[in-house]
Image (cartoon, rainbow, N blue to C red):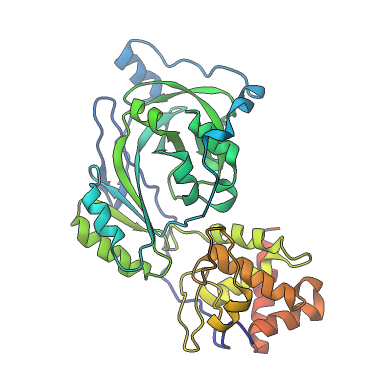
Amino acid sequence: MAPARSRPAAVRPRARSGRGRRLAVAVLAAASAVTLAGGVFTALTFEDGRQRARAATGRSLPEPTGLPGPVANVVDTAQVAPLRRVVPPDVLVVGTSSITAAQARRVSRLRGVRDAALVSGGAVQLQSRLVNTFAVDPSAFRSWTPPATARDTRLWAALAAERFVVSQKAARELRLSTGVQYPIVAKSIPSVMLGGSGDLGLPGIDMLVGKRTGQELGLVPNIALLVNAPGADPAALTRAIEAIFRGGAKVVNLNERKYRQATNYLDLYRQAATGCRGLSWTVLAAIGQVESDHGRNTGPSSAGALGPMQFLPSTWKSYGVDGDRDGKADIMNPYDAIPAAAKYLCDHGGGRGGRSLYNAVYAYNHAHWYVQKVLDLARAYAARYR
């Protein structure tokens, strides 16, 4: 039985928009504050790092010290709890002041909300650039990051040792080296060692520090709230959260195209395809686009298909996968649904290519137009990401 009914592609027309502007929460040297401008968060402008340091302390910023290499290998992975589950964030709330426990509880009680986590944060200066930063408990926060990052225990152990971690983009653009100490300019100017880099999975957030370092930097306590609600309508959930804060926070629907780029899903497609020898991740990506526009239209369909890969519940009973190892196979969770789709295709010959692949996609949805569309999209993905 096919996972989903035969129907037109689930890609919905959307207005074209420019690249989403970066979120920022600014921390001043003397006090912390957040401003709203143009509908998104913008950082209060810092002076050049060296000038600011000289004005505040009478001395210039120190140069980066230390050498990359063996010093980065002394982190103790026992400091970090094992990864139990992966929690993809659907909504990010950034307050104009600290978010209260009562506000967080109201959000957690909204229909469809499964998890919510308060985070401290702010914008600091690194290499004379503003970098939006979260101060986190590594054992708890790792679950909110993409799977490859969440499973990188040494990265979280470095964070537990009060080193800092950056996005791969920040590491590349700022030319940062693991194992080297860098001055971070905020309320204080500590020199902190870079513990590593990875995909942090949040738009505009390019650095993580431990809670103790966050306090030293003067980051705002509980300034942000991450919300996971796999069964909720993201737009409706965003409106409900906005009603709770009444203008006292910026509420960001991370499922909007300008914030949640398809690349997050592409990572899941790539990872899932490794479980089926010969199956290209581009086929999974094509099916994900046709079925739900990469999680933006998760049903139910008129036939009762659900989730980002549009499985029928009856088919899910046989092919459901606990991809994020949280103890259950959730048809609505992309970390479970995408590897389940790979399993289905593989069991139907999708790894053998050619006519076998054609038949496997046809088994997924009994329509020749569907197979042609999926294979055409797969070729387009292969050309774009070669």
What is the quadrant of residue 176 in the picture? Answer: top right
- Residue at screen point 66% across, 60% down: 270
Give residue 190's position: percent from left, percent from top: 41, 21
In this view, the residue in front, 259 or 211, is: 211
Residue 222 place in picture, x, y as percent: 30, 42
From where the camera sits, is residue 173 visible? no
State which quarter of the image contains the N terminus.
bottom right
- Image point 44% across, 55% down: which residue? 19
359 lies above or below 277: below
- Along the line of sight, the residue nearer the viewer: 138 or 134: 138
In the image shown, does 224 or 287 lie closer to the viewer?
224
At a point 50% along the width and 76% down the height, the residue shown is 11
Rendered location of residue 244, percent (x, y): 21, 59
Q: How many numbered callouts?
A: 0
Q: Is residue 50 left or right of residue 240?
A: right
Looking at the image, residue 347 lies above or below residue 18: below
In the displayed structure image, the side of residue 207 where residue 119 appears, left or right: left
Which residue occupies 61% across, 25% down?
74
Quadrant of residue 340 within the rendered picture: bottom right
